[in-house]
Amino acid sequence: MSIQSEKPEIVLHGIPASHGISMGSAYLFLKDSPVVEERFLNRDEVLLEHERLNRSLEKSSKELRKILAFAQEKIGEAKARVLDAQIMVLEDPVLIDSIKKRIDKEKKNAEFIVNDEIGKYASLMLKANDEYMHERAHDMEDLKNRIVRNLLQERLISKIDGSIIVVAHTLTPADTMILSSNQVLGYATDRGGITSHAALFSRAMKIPAIVGLGDVSRYVSSGNQLIIDGYSGTLIIHPSDQHIKEYEQKRDRMLKFEQQLSSLKDLPAETKDGHKVELSANIELLDELEYVVVQGSQGIGLYRTESLLLGRDDFPSEQEQYEEYKKIVDRIYPHRVIMRTFDIGGDKVAPATANETNPFLGWRGIRISLDKPVLFMNQLRAMLRAGARKNLSIMFPMVATIEEVLLAKQYVRKVKAELRAEGIKFYEKTPIGVMIEVPSAALMISRIASEVDFVSIGTNDLTQYLLAVDRGNTLVSKLYKQFHPSVINTLKHIVNGAHKQNIWAGICGEMAGHPLAAPLLVGLGIDELSVVPAVLPEIKKIIRSLNYSEMQELATNALHAETNEELEKILMKFFKKNLHDIPLDSL
Ligand code: PEP
Ligand code: MG
């Protein structure tokens, strides 16, 4: 590998978000402050530029209509009017005509003309000494940015050549998806937390990622050589020969360890003294299925169905969903697939509820499903139909109260009655579970557990809500502590509550796949761990290397810890004492 440079080396540390080591050229993804270049077109390009503009206008209009339709009753009359007004401007033939005429006359690219033309109106409005006009100016800016963004995204997809390490200020799951059509070797961002959804997405795609690097997008220019170490969270700009060698060695060491683990593929996740743990995988995309099977998963513990919505403007029909779900259920058969109904909102696929100021406490998950019965019932129908072979379970996200569980179950009954009446096959006893990720649900576990067949703990959200720390906010990422005693004690409370009602309790948050956490979680009595496929063999190796009694003892000690640091120390000591043949590199 010859990526040396004469420039001084810069080493940055961030939060490791997805394992792996890559070396290659940077691509700076400047989405938040789109640089609108002025480009001259040759004669043949002018017509194509009209087509690009039309596509972008159409996409922008569709997006706005979707926001409007989806959130109309939630966002109130005033905001709906604003969106209506934006659509009217967007479809104003005079404006579009003047943009197209300028493209023809000035022979410049569409984003430049759009930026200039709509920008002119916005500045005029800003100059007026009137609050109302100022607000309208911001709406015009919004609209302009939407059209420009759509033009730039289209260009971006076709623009990048070769393999790249994407460097950005922030990345949404949708950005990650768009960029993934290129050969991406890694992601490095200024912002973001380990459980932000863009981070989950890169893990799902097995691409090394580091988030929370602070200022990386200011240090890096496109074309700079980088090393990204997604195990330790180290990013090196202009790496020295010495570092290149060291990281190549580390990469080989980790690859060798990962290869060794493949011999465990068909063995159960069972402790030395015979305690069985169900070890399954989290997936986001259909593309991951083969990898899940190769990694020796016993099933899918969490399928995040909202990934079906990425990169599209509408909701998939019942039939489309059914076909997608059926492929998963058939491929994993006879093992179980737990499908979670859409968890829209928060930092995920946005319901675009027109700028919620606090989306993580807002319209999200089951709250949206219960407010949108048609959407919800479509999804339930698709799931129930796909589960006719009896290996599908349904799970609801973001449940906070027992009322939500009862109401969601009512919809399930209603959908079953419809299917029965229509003579459509489904499994009458399809298990229904909920995610426990909101503190109120954790506290009320006994009551909730009496209504469902299983619970799966979402430690990513549970941690953020227990500690009041936004999971994607770098400013407070130091306070986001998955090993905080409040989290561990809550887990114990949930397991006890679930077992008292004779149902099983699993974990599908990122913690389940953390090598330090796994022995503790098993020791706490967790019945199932659902992890990202990449770490599954390592977690299996850990479980198979230990006695259940040792893990129970560890859990008893851990429950007495008073701080996150104290708990991590206990876990690290246990790991070093009992798990010598697992490289610490993986922690
Ligand atoms: C969680 O919150 O732990 C979880 C698994 O769900 P998500 O990360 O999709 O919010
Ligand atoms: Mg969650």
Image: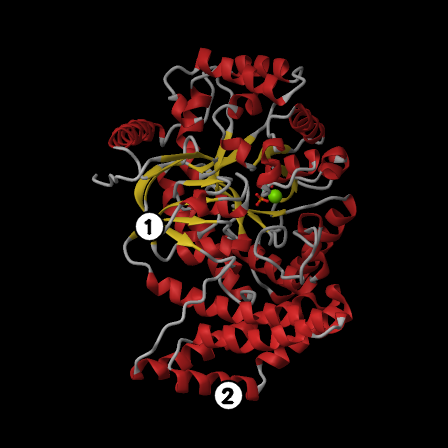
Residue 164 numbered mark, or none? 1
CA neighbours of label 2 inside 10 A, class few (<14), some (14 to 19), many (20+): few
What whole-number distance in Å separates the C-alpha atoms at marks 1 and 2?
A: 38 Å
Number of numbered markers: 2
In the rendering, at what x and y percent does residue 222 appear?
35, 52
In the rendering, at what x and y percent does residue 224 appear?
32, 46
Q: Which residue is mark 2?
A: 97
Residue 503 numbered mark, or none? none
Q: Nearer the viewer, mark 1 or mark 2?
A: 2
In the rendering, at what x and y percent does residue 228 appear?
37, 38
410 on left or right of 12: right
Looking at the rendered structure, the secondary structure element under dot 2 is: helix
Question: Is ligand 1 closer than 8 angstroms to the Cβ of mark 1?
Answer: no
Q: Is residue 368 above or below residue 196?
A: below
505 on left or right of 31: right
Q: Is residue 382 above or below residue 166?
A: below
Q: Where does the C terminus fall, quadrant-wise?
A: top left
Amino acid under disc 1: Ile
Q: Where does the N terminus fall, quadrant-wise?
A: top left
Ligand 2 rendered quadrant: top right
In the rendering, at what x and y percent does residue 326 appear?
47, 55
Q: Is residue 126 above or below residue 280?
A: below
Residue drawn at the location 54% of the way across and 53% of the way down: 305
Tell me which numbered mark, 1 or 2, is placed earlier along the sequence: 2
